Amino acid sequence: MLFRRVALLSASILAIAACGAAANDGESAAGQPSPLRPGSLPPTFVPVPPAEAGFESTSSTLPRTTVPLSPDALVGARVSGNRVLLIGDSVLAGTARRYSDDMCEALVPLGWQVELNAETARFVEFGDVVLDARLSAGWDAVVILLGNNYRGVQADFADAMTTMVERLAPRPVVLLTVSEFTPSRVQVNEVIFELAATYPHVVVVDWGAITAADGSLTGADDLHLTDSGRVALAAEVAQAMGPAPVEPGRCLPTEFDDDSSGSVDPATTTTTIRRTNRTTTSTAATQPPTTPPTTPPDSGSGTSDPPST
């Protein structure tokens, strides 16, 4: 059985999401728990997928059964540096420094140097645009949240995501699932789970299951994040990352901050910028890396479902 690693908000959210999935799909899988390191982060979880993997579409929420992720599977335990690149659309952009700054506030104290490149109305191809411009700067890990703007062709989305994942290997890559409020969005998450089952350097944070279990994290559109949703999203990424092996952490500038095509706020049509000038320092614990430093490799049209984010 193929194992997929997923980080969830809490054990209680996990239980609700797992039960809901079992009720809808009539199936679940089991895994063996691993102990967590005392005094570190809250539990991080991984899912156990169905026995058969692939890109076959389903009409209901994917089943999620999870077990704790061992400390040595956290991203920070698998790298020797502390530079992390984040890529996404408006959902991730809401956690950027120009808005809430929640992502840097969650990751910098853990010792990570964080560059968040996310803009509104971006499709999956935006990932390669960012990598073309920024991959040569040298990154130890990458976090990707793309798929909220989905054209409905699963094979095309799978090809684009696979290209990015292979381009980033052997770095750890954290992929976030999308909220599943339409059947087509289940197709996006099927691709993400299959990538985790295929590539050992991929970790999944199941944001789709988290938002399904707690409606307060998204607004009226079931997509864009509330204030508590932004905090929760950043916390989930931090749980998957764990402490960086070195410090200091720092919030890095970005050239990708064009939000002229949409909004990061739920059920609104304009963008409100909330800039911050806060400086955050880190107190990350030092721990030996389990993998050597990674070396950076050499360096459409359509409509979205739901509306562009």
Image (tube, grey):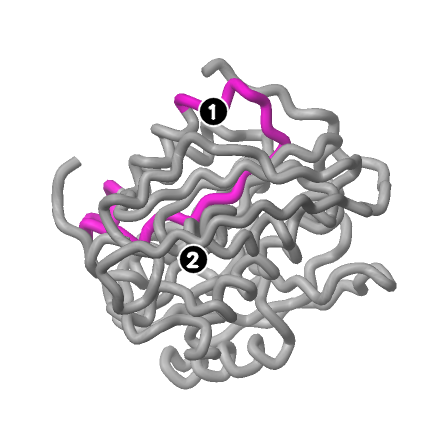
Instruction: Report which residue position mark 2 lands on.
Output: 177
| Residue at image point 63% right, 31% down | 140
Quadrant (top left/top right/bottom left/bottom right) for the C terminus: bottom left
Q: Residues within 10 Å of mark 2 (few under 14, many from 20)?
A: many
**Element at label 1:** helix
On the picture, is 305 further left or further right than 289? left
**Element at label 2:** loop
Residue 228: image location, x then y, percent: 51, 70
Give whichever of 169, 210 is nearer the camera. 210
On the picture, is 6 further left or further right than 215? right
Task: Tell me how far mark 1 sits from mark 2, CA to CA.
Answer: 23 Å
Give whichever of 206, 194 is nearer the camera. 206
Q: Residues within 10 Å of mark 1 (few under 14, many from 20)?
A: some
In magenta, the rendered stretch is 132-156
Instruction: Report which residue position mark 1 lands on.
Output: 134
| Residue at image point 55% right, 21% down | 137
Residue 45: image location, x then y, percent: 63, 64
